[in-house]
Image (cartoon, rainbow, N blue to C red):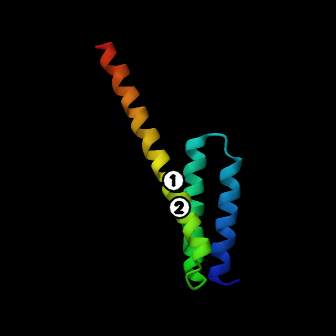
Amino acid sequence: MDITSIVGYSASLVIIISFILNDITKLRIVNTLGCVLFVAYGYLLDVTWPIILPNAFIMGVNIYRLWSSQKKNNSQLYKTSSSRT
């Protein structure tokens, strides 16, 4: 099996695993890894844009949602700690 096939199958497996997870944060992190692998797979297939573009977009959405969730959690943590003092 060549490296392109390994990356492609790995990407598929990681995406499948991500949808089994119950925690949305873990799902987004694992799904982002799958997207990274699919983008690499698209490049290994001589720049296959129909594989690269949607996965790059989904990866961007996942990163944005993780960032905004982290920002919201930090804000709530600050409010909670400020109200205790």
Q: For mark 2, what is the residue? A: 57
Left or right: 85 in relation to 4: left
> 83 above or below 19?
above
> Could you say where residue 68 lies in the image, as x and y percent from the top left?
43, 42
Spatial CA span between label 1 and label 2: 6 Å
Left or right: 22 in relation to 65: right
- Disc 1 packing (10 Å; few <14; some 14–19; many ≥20): some
- Callout 1–callout 2 Cβ contact below 8 Å: yes
> 23 above or below 82?
below
> 78 above or below 52?
above
Quadrant location of the N terminus in the rendered image: bottom right
- Residue 52 disc label: none
Q: Quadrant of residue 44?
A: bottom right
Q: For mark 1, what is the residue? A: 61
Kindly state the secondary structure of the residue where label 2 is placed. Answer: helix
* Amino acid at dot 2: Phe
The residue lying at 55 percent from left, 74 percent from top is 40
Q: Nearer the viewer, residue 65 or 6?
A: 65
* Amino acid at dot 1: Val
> Could you say where residue 71 lies in the image, as x and y percent from the top left?
39, 38
Quadrant location of the C terminus in the rendered image: top left
- Disc 2 packing (10 Å; few <14; some 14–19; many ≥20): few
The residue lying at 67 percent from left, 40 percent from top is 22
The residue lying at 54 percent from left, 51 percent from top is 29
